[in-house]
Image (cartoon, rainbow, N blue to C red):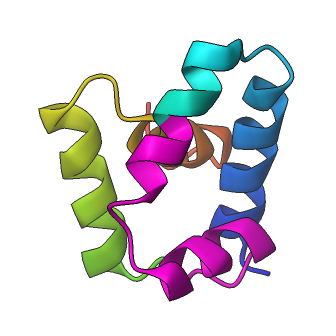
Amino acid sequence: MSPLNRAFQERLFESLLGFNSDDFRRLVMELQHFPDDAVNDLIFGDYHFSPQATTRLIFDALRRPGSIVGHHVILGLQRLGRLG
């Protein structure tokens, strides 16, 4: 598992502990827009956070402030110290 995979998962799973049913529903609805293999890779830590894939998720987070996945990618990058 890559360091960014680990940081992403840590942030997302920490957040899941505080999710209410609406938050969880938003996450599930958002994951429906990803291919099945990408969802499995995100869940099981095999997602290849290439610069292109990571940039796409970050732009998604900026374009849609409610994006749970994109928001947690940014938090993962912050945890790694790659963002301010």
Q: Position of residue 25 (x, y in %)?
A: 55, 30
Q: Position of residue 41 (x, y in %)?
A: 64, 80
Q: Quadrant of the C terminus?
A: top left
Q: Is residue 21 left or right of residue 81?
A: right
Q: Is residue 13 above or below residue 32?
A: above
- Residue placed most toward the observer, 37 or 51: 37
In which quadrant of the rendered view does residue 51 lie? bottom left
The answer to whether residue 72 of the structure is visible from this angle is no
- Residue placed most toward the observer, 26 or 69: 26
> What are the residue bounds of the magenta stretch?
27-47
Q: Residue at x 33, y 75 (%)?
A: 53
Q: How many marks?
A: 0
The answer to whether residue 50 of the structure is visible from this angle is yes
Q: Is residue 80 above or below residue 21?
A: below
Q: Residue at x 86, y 23 (%)?
A: 17
Q: Quadrant of the N terminus?
A: bottom right
Q: Position of residue 67 (x, y in %)?
A: 36, 34
Q: Is residue 21 above or below residue 13?
A: above
The answer to whether residue 77 is magenta is no
Q: Is residue 53 left or right of residue 22?
A: left
Task: List the single residue furthest toward the left.
Answer: 63
Q: Position of residue 16 (x, y in %)?
A: 77, 29
Q: Is residue 41 left or right of residue 29?
A: right
Q: Residue at x 32, y 61 (%)?
A: 33
Classified by dominant secondary structure, the portion drawn in magenta counts as: helix
Q: Residue at x 75, y 53 (%)?
A: 9
